Image (cartoon, rainbow, N blue to C red):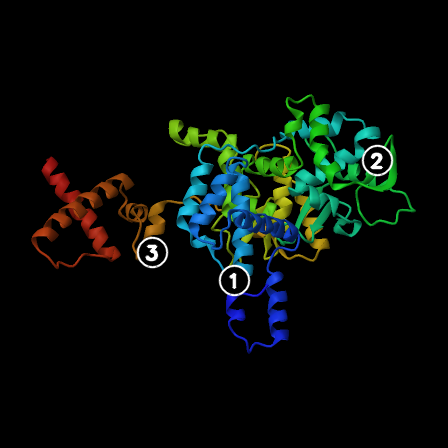
Amino acid sequence: MESDSDESFSCTPEEIVKAASTATSNLLPEKSKGQYLIEFDLFMKWRAEKQVCSFTERVLLAYFEEKSKQWKSPTLWSTYSKLKSTLLINNNVDISKYSKLIAYLKNKWVGYKPRKSKTFSREEVYKFLEDAPDKHFLMHKVALILGIAGALRRKELYKMILEDINDTGTVLIITIPDSKTHIQRRFTVIAEPTQKNLNLIEIYRKYKAQRPKNVKSNHFFLQFRNGNCKTQVVGINTFSKIPSIVAKYLSLPNPDHYTGHAFRRSSASLLVDSGGDLIQLKKHGGWKSNAVAEGYVDESIQNKMDCANKIFTGGQSSRNTSNPASFSANNINDNGVRRWGFAGGWTVGPTTAVEAAATANVLGMHSAPGSEFHTTTVTDSLRNENIKFVQKEDNPANCPETRPIEDFWSLLKGKKSTMCIARELGINEHTVRRALHKSTHNESVKDKQRSGRPKCTNNRDLERKVLKEISTSGSRHH
């Protein structure tokens, strides 16, 4: 796959040309490289049939116009992305500069409504975990717990191995070493009873205890039938059907609309509805860009209710806003390290507590609105992992001690408060304030007439102003 520039130099050694060809061929994504090459071959065959020799913008527009009669807008964009990479590598043609082609594809997108997987509510998740018999649905329950707790894709569930799960006794710490976006993620499942008094870790342990001893595969998920765990690994297509099976058991409408992406979408939706913000959502799901994550925020019904409340009632909502896992720009320590909060304390640096808080927020594991959630559980887990954090008692709430504002002013300006002056003069504090207000007003009027007049700032001048104003007011009154 030589570029035109390589062919123009006959002095280029053959081994250099081969090395460059190998390097450029590796620029395509490894997982979908075959699909890229198939799309490139289809386009080249179309060019041969039409007897076209160039790669101009008009040629690309004609190709996409013909394919638009067969394909929908997402397929057109996918084809454009694949051709953009393959044409640049093989023919040194950059179609990303074709502005008319991009405008054409955007115009085809107008009016298109993508079909997205339906999501489970928190009540539906608990209902399935509580009511479904373990004899037939134990494996489905564990997949549901891990899938929603970690916003997992079906491939991440399929590739999960035993070493990825660390059972500390009170917390499950699950590591996803390689995701679709090549970001390592970690999330947790806690042992505290949920709203339905279900111990999620006990469900996991019950399934793991059924694992046969003669299993050669290291995959965590094995087939489970009639109360017995088999040696056969659960396939990736089976994980695609699990959400639909759960929906059918719960008698939900259109169960076929619960696809393999239902767990991931449900996790993101539950987190946002519980008060999670954009940064926490991106960390929880491993999204690099804001576009996809913002989609979940925009679709949140609870978020729309909050907007309506702010519009019509001025923000006086009864919703619990004390989200223990929410992000605050003020949570920065003296060393400039951002801190993520939860009820048990503050973590510094690592994101383990962020993921722990996000997991608990997704599954709604706070016992009551505004109460602390899994304080002991998370702090014990952080200690076991040797993660440093600040205890809650050493990091009090941002509630200043109530005291008269005049004392604060006097400390800043070196002046006595009106209360102090009133005590020393033996008069009412209200009288002092009124006298100071009149005196200040009179001085401001005189300052407009005489510029540059010094203002009194010491305590003795304040007392003189008060006494003068009081005596003046008294003489006018008489």
Work out which quarter of the rendered image holds the N terminus and state it: bottom right
Instruction: Give the foreground label among 1 and 2.
Output: 2
For image coordinates 72% across by 48% down, the residue present is 173
Cα distance in 3D space between marks 2 and 3: 71 Å
Q: Is residue 223 above or below residue 439?
A: above
Q: Which residue is mark 1?
A: 335
Q: Which residue is mark 2?
A: 224
Pick whichever of labels 1 and 3 is earlier in the sequence: 1
Dot 3 alpha-carbon crowd within 10 angstroms: few under 14, some 14 to 19, many 20 or more = few
Residue 178 locus on image (x, y percent): 68, 53
Residue 394 locus on image (x, y percent): 57, 52
Secondary structure of the residue carrying numbered label 1? loop
Does the rendering let one see residue 345? no
Q: Which residue is mark 3?
A: 412
Secondary structure of the residue carrying numbered label 3? helix
Q: Using the image as rendered, state which of residue 219 and residue 392 is in the foreground.
A: 219
Residue that protrudes farthest toward the left in the picture: 449
For image coordinates 27% across by 39% down, the residue present is 430
Q: Amino acid at mark 2?
A: Phe
